[in-house]
Amino acid sequence: MTRLEGKIAIITGAAQGMGASHARKFIEEGAKVVLTDLNEEKGKNLAAELGKNALFVKHNVTSADDWANVVAETEKTFGPVNILVNNAGITMAKSMLEVTEEEYRRIVDINQVSVFLGMKAVIPVMQKAGSGSIVNISSMNGMVAGAIGYTDTKFAVRGMTKAAAMECAHYGIRVNSVHPGVIATPMVVQEDTKAAVEEFSKHIPLKRVAQPEEVSSLVVYLASDESSYSTGSEFIVDGGLTAI
């Protein structure tokens, strides 16, 4: 028996990077998965690769209407949603004095507001079922300081997770946050940042960056019934960085 057999999941930002890794792992564990992203080409290709238990839906995570469409498409194709992984997000590495109001509002919309909209969209479905698991991907910068905009939104995801967990506990819906450190995704190991990442990895207690699959294993655990008594909690996967 696979760990997610019979489960139906929505994973945002799933066309590449950690989201794609989560989708692959979920399929391996028996789930039916709706992958969402704005990158239609990569998303469709990955869904085709994953087979009949995967569906791609183009999705602007900052749009409530798009969220309603994703939930409707999921129910029409596979059935009621059991699992939501709010994975979509962007980074920004500018100083406070350099960041424009437009840039700041954009990262808040994508990293923070989208998580609120996603939970709001799936909770009524999970309420009817009497159970569900929501996994919000934050960051180690939801625990410790980093760049303006990115840090703010990742702390907000951590706070929303706790608030939603308390509100949803009596419905049997669990809500937890995952806080990755430096992960070997295309965004992190691209040519212009590769050398800096390799140098930084020397300061990580485990002396290396993580592979996306190492985060995916934790996400599967939180999505599965194995974590049935965990809600409102932070799960850190950072090689020991926040322990320093």
Image (cartoon, helix red, strand yellow):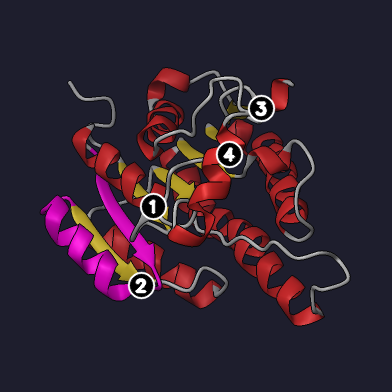
Label drawn at residue 72? none
Quarter holding residue 129: top left
Dot 2 crowding, Cα within 10 Å, few <14, some 14–19, many 20+: some
Camera-near label (4 vs 1) is 4
Disc number placed over residue 39 in the picture, else none: 2
Q: Earlier in the sequence, mark 3 or mark 1?
A: 1
Q: Amino acid at mark 3?
A: Leu
62 vs 111: above or below: below
Q: Percent x, y for residue 14?
A: 37, 56
Between tags 4 and 2, which lies in front? 4
Q: Which residue is mark 1?
A: 17
The answer to which of 101 and 54 lies nearer the viewer is 101
Marks 2/3: CA–CA distance:
32 Å
The residue under the point 30% across, 47% down is 23
Q: If you read the primary sequence from the N terminus, does the residue marked by circle 4 or circle 1 appear first?
A: 1
The label shown at residue 241 is 3
Going by the numbered disc 4, the residue's amino acid type is Glu
Residue 107 in the image: state x and y as whole percent. 67, 67
Which-is-in-front pick, marks 2 and 3?
A: 3
Q: Amino acid at mark 1?
A: Gly
- Indicate yes or no whether the magenta region holds residue 46: yes
Residue at coordinates 58% horizontally, 39% vertically from top-left?
199
In this view of the protein, can residue 107 be seen by the observer? Answer: yes
Q: Quadrant of residue 41?
A: bottom left
Whether pointer 4 and pointer 2 mark residues with C-beta atoms closer than 8 Å, the reply is: no
Does the rendering let one see residue 180? no
